[in-house]
Image (cartoon, rainbow, N blue to C red):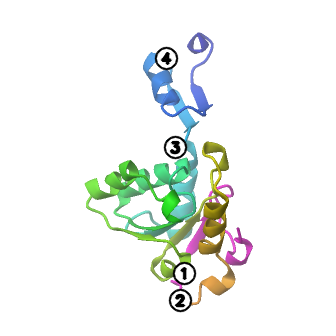
């Protein structure tokens, strides 16, 4: 019925797959603005723009994804998109919040590299982009131990970067703009 009054539907819904379902039954295009813990393609477009603007390219970059990789839909969308640009991935999270196998399969299907870490300092020397994401408390029962460990293992400050690449750029997904390392304490 909404399609009768609109030329386009931009939809954000907490249920995974809801935008896909809507696109199958709608007569007008549906843009997924986020569906549960699945995808967030509109944020991904902003992230791709920001990365290209700071790095001059999207090709052959080494991207470090930090935080809640299990439920972070922005991470899932960015991994899928960057697989088109021959990226390498460093995945930094507590074991409980590792990137889901279905998302890692996108990397494997493209024969691209990824490495998993629990400490951010181990990935920084290899990074062109550091993409910080928050713990998605609304999508799961928060575990105090996990949240505390994530804050400690993913803290990024100016002292975290003594061996960093000179062209490194850090992103915080809510800002989608360059962020000074000293401001990224979680």
Expressed as whole percent of the image width and height from the top left, the position of residue 31 reads: 53, 32
Residue that numbered label 3 is attached to: 41
Query: In the drawing, does residue 59 fall left or right of residue 75?
Result: left
**Magenta region, mostly helix, strand or loop?**
loop
- Of the two numbered discs 2 and 4 in the rendering, the one whose residue sits closer to the viewer: 2
- Dot 1 or dot 2, earlier in sequence: 1
Asked whether 177 or 140 is in front, the reply is 140
Res. 121 mark: 1
Mark closer to the observer (1, 4): 1
The one of 2 and 100 positioned closer to us in this rendering: 100
Q: CA distance from mark 2 to mark 4?
A: 51 Å
Disc number for residue 163: 2
Q: Considering the numbered disc 2 on the image, is that residue within a helix, a strand or a loop?
A: loop
User: What residue is at 63 percent from the left and 47 percent from the top?
Assistant: 141
Q: Position of residue 8 (x, y in %)?
A: 57, 24
Element type where label 1 sits in the image? helix
* In this view, the mark in front (1 or 2): 1
- Compare marks 3 and 2 and give the one earlier in the sequence: 3
Residue indicated by mark 4: 26
Few, some or many residues within 10 Å of mark 3 (<14, 14–19, 20+): many
Looking at the rendered structure, the secondary structure element under dot 3 is helix
Does label 3 or label 4 sit earlier along the sequence? 4
Can you say which quadrant of the picture contains the C terminus?
bottom right
Give the CA separation, mark 3 to mark 2.
32 Å
């Amino acid at each position: 019925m909404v399609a009768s009054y609109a030329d386009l539907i931009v939809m954000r819904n907490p249920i995974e797959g809801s935008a896909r379902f809507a696109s199958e039954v709608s007569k007008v295009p549906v843009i997924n603005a986020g569906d549960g813990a699945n995808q967030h393609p509109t944020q991904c477009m902003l992230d791709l723009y920001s990365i290209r603007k700071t790095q001059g390219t999207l090709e052959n970059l080494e991207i470090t994804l930090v935080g809640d990789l299990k439920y972070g839909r922005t991470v899932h969308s960015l991994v899928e998109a960057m697989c088109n640009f021959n990226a390498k991935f460093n995945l930094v999270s507590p074991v409980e919040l590792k990137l889901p196998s279905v998302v890692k399969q996108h990397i494997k299907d493209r024969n691209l590299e990824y490495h998993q870490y629990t400490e951010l300092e181990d990935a920084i020397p290899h990074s062109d982009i550091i993409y910080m994401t928050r713990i998605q408390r609304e999508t799961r029962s928060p575990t105090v131990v996990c949240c505390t460990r994530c804050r400690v293992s993913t803290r990024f400050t100016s002292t975290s970067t003594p061996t960093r690449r000179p062209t490194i750029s850090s992103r915080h997904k809510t800002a989608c703009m360059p962020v000074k390392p000293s401001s990224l304490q979680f």
